[in-house]
Each structure stands twice: as C-alpha cells, then as structure tokens.
Amino acid sequence: MELHVTSETGRLKEVVLGLPTDNGPVPSLDKTFDSKSYESVLHGVYPLEKDIAAEMSAFEAVLRKYGVSVLRPNPVHDCNQVFSRDVGFVIDDKIIVSNIIPDRQEEIDAYGDIYSQIHYKNIYNLPEAVHVEGGDVILWGDVIFLGQYAFEDYPMVKTARTNRLALDYLRMLFPGKTIVPLNLRKSDTDPYEGILHLDCTFMPVGRGKAIIYRRGFLNPRDADHIVEMFGGPQNFFELTTEEMYWMNSNVFSISEDVVVTEEHFYRLNNHLRNVWGMTVETVPYREISKMGGLLRCSTLPLRRD
C-alpha cells in the first residue's frame, strides 16, 4: 500500500473509516475521556448504537460517491472504534501509530490487517514518552500545525493528548517541514471551555480558506499567527462558542472543492457554498458529536493527491 498525505484537502483516494457497532455499554462518568462525553453521560443523552451506525453509513455513502476507497478496522467486542483519527495519522509516506491512552489500546490492535499492507519502514511506533494523536496534527503542505498541552499538569489532564516531546519527535522525523506548536485550552468536564484536539478549533478547507475558533488557543497570538499565514481574516470563517461546542471545525475535505459537513451547520454551510463557492455534502452526525468527535475524527486518510 502506497501512503501519501501532505494536506487536509488534496483529492482523497483511500481512507480508513471507524466502526459504529459493538461499542460496549455507556461509560460511567469517571471512564469518559473528553468533556463532551462527560456531559452526554451526565445528562443521559449518550448516543445509541443504531443512531451511530446510521450516521456513519451516511458518511460512508458520500465517500464512496466520490470514488474513495474505504477501509475499516477489524471489529473489537465492547470497544468504541468510531474515531480512527486518534489511532494513527499519515504524513507524506509515513504512518505514525499514536500512543493513545491505555484504555484504548485494543483499538490500535484492530488495525493489524491494514498495517500488514504497508512496508514496515513506513510505519513508526512512537517512543513511550511521546504522546500525540491524529486530531492534533493538521497538514498544510510543508507546514505541520501541532496542537499540544505543554504544561506541568499534563499527566493530570485527560483531554491533554499531545505533549511537548511530540514536537521534538516530529521535527526529527520531518526535518524539512515547519512545525507550528499551538497550546490548546483544556477542560475535562466543560465542552464550552475545553478543546480536545486541534481540529476542534482550526481546520483548512481548501482554496486557501480555513475555519477557526480563536478562544481555543491559550495564547491569542497563536490564532493571529495562523490567520497571517493564510493571508488575512478574509480567508477565515470564525466560529462562535456555540458552533465550536457542536464541532463546526471538525469537517472533512474530499478535495479542494468538496467538503463534508454536518447538516445542522447552517451558517458554516451557507458560507462555504455561497461565499467560497464550494460543494458541500451534508450528513447527519449530531449523535456522534456527543462522544467528543465528528467527521474528521472518524477518518484516517491513507492516500490523497
């Protein structure tokens, strides 16, 4: 299997889509891994498996409509396998296997058949001390935007998934790229305050455009720097706190011109279509969002043009 991913918006050829079934029981509050799941369990609105399956089927249908080859991990009993982005990510021709939290190790094992099709020299297992998940890695040509939480209380924060050592490791692995570290605001229990991954507060969508939620960054200058890199505020769609809460930035591009979004993202979808002239494919994904992820979180792209 040939790997090639250098951006979020190159024409998608092959992708791993997570699995919606056999997720196991609703977790207890102390077993939730993110603030949105915490809130869903607390209020008794954690999604049902049948609704998760229906939403992922709608997403898969759109991917196949555009000729994308869709792979799936092996099923694991009583294991939530919806969010394949957490398990690994591809940069150029290399796939990096994430050091995800120990309770989710079974998810990585389910990708064995897929990894067996990739040359071993292109598979990178992280050193134990290096923590990074795919949701914190956003590619833009020769630039890697890296969401992180580089503070002493990192081990105590459940929603801190990428540490300072990840920056050093990626610099070593990709010396020709510019890596932009971005510290994210965290909360384990309040989804209006905390940002789980970088793709929950920032996302390029093609044509030099991007979506951003400024308050997601601990340092306001980081948001300013990103806007400057993309040529100014006219190239951005800025989210409200409520839109961030529903994960409006966690969309998924099939190409520079085609983006998949959630059907309730009315303001964003109108802007993408009528201001930026993009083709917007909408799917229902609101139930899945109650588990702390959305469309990009559900995918692991393997090949893009």
Image (cartoon, rainbow, N blue to C red):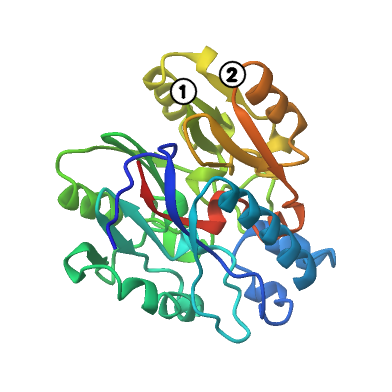
Instruction: Indicate whether 197 appears above or below 109.
Output: above
- In this figure, which residue is indicated by the disc labeled 2? 276
Residue 196 visible in the current orientation: no
Which percent across, then down, holds residue 276?
59, 19
**As drawn, which residue projects farthest toward the bottom?**
77
Q: Are marks 2 and 1 in contact (CB under 8 Å)?
A: yes
- Look at label 1 and name its amino acid: Arg
Quarter of the picture containing the N terminus is bottom left
Q: Is residue 3 left or right of residue 77?
A: left
Q: CA distance from mark 2 to mark 1?
A: 8 Å
Q: Along the polypeptide, which appears first: circle 2 or circle 1?
A: 1
What is the secondary structure assignment of the residue under circle 1? Answer: loop
Identify the residue shown where x is 66% and y is 77%.
Answer: 23
Which percent across, then down, holds residue 274?
68, 18
**Depth order, front residue of 162/55:** 55
**As drawn, which residue projects farthest toward the right?**
44
What is the secondary structure assignment of the residue under circle 2? Answer: loop
Question: Where is residue 76, by image quadrant?
Answer: bottom right
- In this figure, which residue is indicated by the disc labeled 1? 207
- Look at label 2 and name its amino acid: Trp
Which percent across, then down, holds residue 244?
66, 39
Identify the residue shown where x is 26% and y is 34%.
Answer: 142
Instruction: Indicate whether 253 appears above or below 103.
Output: above
**Within 10 Å of the Cα at label 1, are there few (<14), some (14-19), or many (20+) other Cα atoms?**
some
Identify the residue shown where x is 15% and y is 39%.
Answer: 176
Residue 53 visible in the current orientation: yes
Quarter of the picture containing the C terminus is top left
**Within 10 Å of the Cα at label 2, are there few (<14), some (14-19), or many (20+) other Cα atoms?**
some
